Amino acid sequence: MIRKLYKLVILMAIMFILTSCVGKREIDDLAMVMGVGLDLVENKNGEEEVKVTAQIARPADARGQTGAPSGQTGEPIWSISATDKSIFGAIRKLENLSSRRIFWAHSYVIVINEDLAKNGIKDIIDFFIRNPELRMRTWVTVTPDDASELVSSLTGLEVIPGQSIEGLFKYSDITRAAPRSQMIDLHAAYLSDATQPYVARLKLETNELSNQTPEQGEMYKNVTHAGTGVFKDDKLVGTLSAKETRSLLLFVENIKSGVSIIPCAENEEDVTTFELVHEELKVIPDYKEGTPEFTLKVKTTGKLVETDCAIGFDDDQKIKELESNIEEKFKKDINKVLDKIQQEYGVDILEAGNSFNNKLPSKWKEMRVNWDDHFQDATFHVDITAEIKSGALLIEPTESNKRADE
Amino acid sequence: MKIKITNGMYMALIINMVYAKSIGVTQGSIARDVGSDMWISTIIATVSAMLLILLTVMIIRRMPKADIFDQSKAMLGPWVGKLICLVIFIFFTLSFGPIMVTFVFHLKDFFLPEAPLFLFVFIAVLVGGFAIYFGIEVIARMALIGVFSILLLNGLLILGALEDFDVRELLPVFEFGITKPVIASRHHLADWSIVIMMCLIILPLVDNQKEWGRSSLVGVIFSFIFIVMWPILETGVLTSQVTSQYLIACMQMARSAHLGFFLHRYEMFMIAFFGISILTQIAIALLCGSVALSKLFGLKDFRPLIIPVSLIMGGYGYWVVQSHNHAMDILENSWVSLSLSITLGVVGVVWILGFFLKKKFKSEKG
């Protein structure tokens, strides 16, 4: 009897959970956002509002490489925007425009206009880390252009521009023109008491030729990496150029590649190109006379990839000269960036505070409250060792024998 | 024939019982207290748990065929025995709060925000109640599979997180001194208290009595290995500040893991592989609660009490998870103090009284 009663209770109970799939979302009911743009705009009353632009994939026309587009719109993405006082408010307004439920989980990139970033991005960080739908590995960037224009522009080889922008980051360890800034890093840096946030900077550049009218030169815009946006707490306080970013990345990322161009010793108009294959930094913090000191030991190895100079890889003396030229140039570049970050922006985006805390935790406790002030006064000693390990395929210099005969 | 479980199943039960909450919910609480030293607090709590579990084995060995209820009845008489039953039933009812916090918030906050709260609690007690109807052996076998799931989840997480791991985030060690990590270890020790109380009830069912102590220690050590990886990765990948912001820190960790560029987000892996652990917790809490209540009322079988116990525990669990604030308050304050008081109280009192009442064990054995 009791068994029968149990079976009946279980059957009755199962009825409750088999009524439907609670919270289900069908894939053809979703509008997949591939990129988000955030701009600062003024409404009719002169009040500042956030403009949210969503780059949404149009499935019928975004089939990838083998499927032919069937939507016949010619546009693989559908870009829509809405404004409101909060991001969530604007997003809800976007729902009014869309025939499908807007789905944010596949967004590759968040692009923030620099004017908005100067006002503060605390609300943006909060919104994107609070929402379970969004990825923590979404790329976060700032742009001097309109974010709405940037996310609506077709760029790169991929059908979906968001995917192309992600591709830029995928290979950014070769170009080193922008940091690989993801939402998770921005969030951590914003919460940290030792480090200030920085994000990649994107720009629209006219650099694409028309295949029909190549004689007209570059006509179309593409999204490119354009350095770094530097923040103090949540406000953008300045930017570093793509060239300056190369020195910044030494502090914050694992360097796998890079290019440096050095003038030749004999003739300064001729240059040698050095491809960096490995670079490592050891930061040694110290505390002297009331100010923090950092000794930066940089070890760079690379190879000669292009040269106008008459350098054979078997010429030890010339290679040594070249190595010392590289050291000098790198030291100059690093000191320039350090000056800019310390004196102009006054923020620690180099994770120097973290290193200081790890080595001298008791001193850190005294300094953590005003770390940015202490960071401005900190002394950096740069000690670089460059080593050219190969001349790629060549041993001898590429010199014309005719000239040798003369 | 009395049901027996193997020592391997017993170890699997220990691992599953402590894993689900300890890797994320607990680590978030510890991170709020001691930042990047959360892995140190986890070690301190595990060492304390090792001592407690050895004490538990010593207690049950005095009357190897009797659980804590029968032993306290034999030692202190029927009324004190009933009091112990009631206290342990209250303990497991209270434990259903944090268990439901772990189960409900993992699913509701990250997957089904629109689904009604009732559904999660209802499914938990339905599945848990159904499992215990078939007895502990079924749950213990399920726990063995749970260990493999845990291994898979940990392996996948290591693969998905190592690329972004920064060991410097773990430094400096003992940033907040020594006392604070010791105090913060209470959160994890509260997780262990459920295991200790479970052992007081199920240890007589474990087959090889000679190996009880060794099996218990090995269970704790393996649990530690599976768990400690999480605070280390959470600190090295998310940073302790980010971990401390979240109620379910392990899901945030899973959200941040990725294998290459194409396999983002581990939330589904997380739910799939830690599911058995949390279901083991639900089932064992219901089982131990039902056994305690059946001994309180002098019933021979606990099964008639499954539905009433499910209703009481489910009702309490539902009350706890109604709001995040409420849940957090219970989880980090009242649950910790009550669970540790009850566990240390029961284990301590029974252990100490056992020295004075040795004769009663002998007469019972005889």
Image: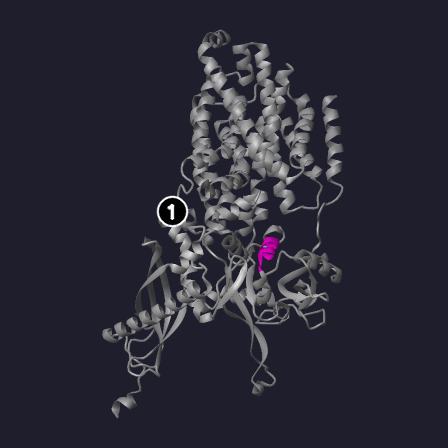
Q: Is residue B259 magenta?
A: no
Residue A401 on image: x %, y %:
28, 88
Image-based side of B22 in relation to A40, left or right: left
Among all residues in the image, which is located at the extreme front? A290
Residue A293 on image: x %, y %:
34, 57
Amino acid type at image mark 1 = Pro
Q: Residue at x 38, y 52 (%)?
A: A356
Residue B202 lies in quadrant: top right
Coloring basis for residues: one colour
In this view of the protein, which residue sits in the foreground, B103 or B317?
B317
Q: Is residue A223 above or below residue B39?
A: below
Residue A186 appears anywhere in the view = yes
Q: Which residue is mark 1?
A: A361
Output the chain of dot 1. A
Residue A283 appears anywhere in the view = no
Q: Is residue B180 above or below residue A272?
A: above
Q: Is residue A275 above or below residue A352?
A: below
Q: Residue at x 62, y 58 (%)?
A: A106
Q: Residue at x 52, y 54 (%)?
A: A190
Residue A149 lies in quadrant: bottom right
Q: Which stretch appears magenta?
A: A120-128
Image-based side of B362 in relation to A17, left or right: left
Quarter of the image with the N terminus of chain A is: top right
In this view of the protein, which residue sits in the foreground, A136 or B147?
A136
Q: Is residue B261 above or below residue B236?
A: below
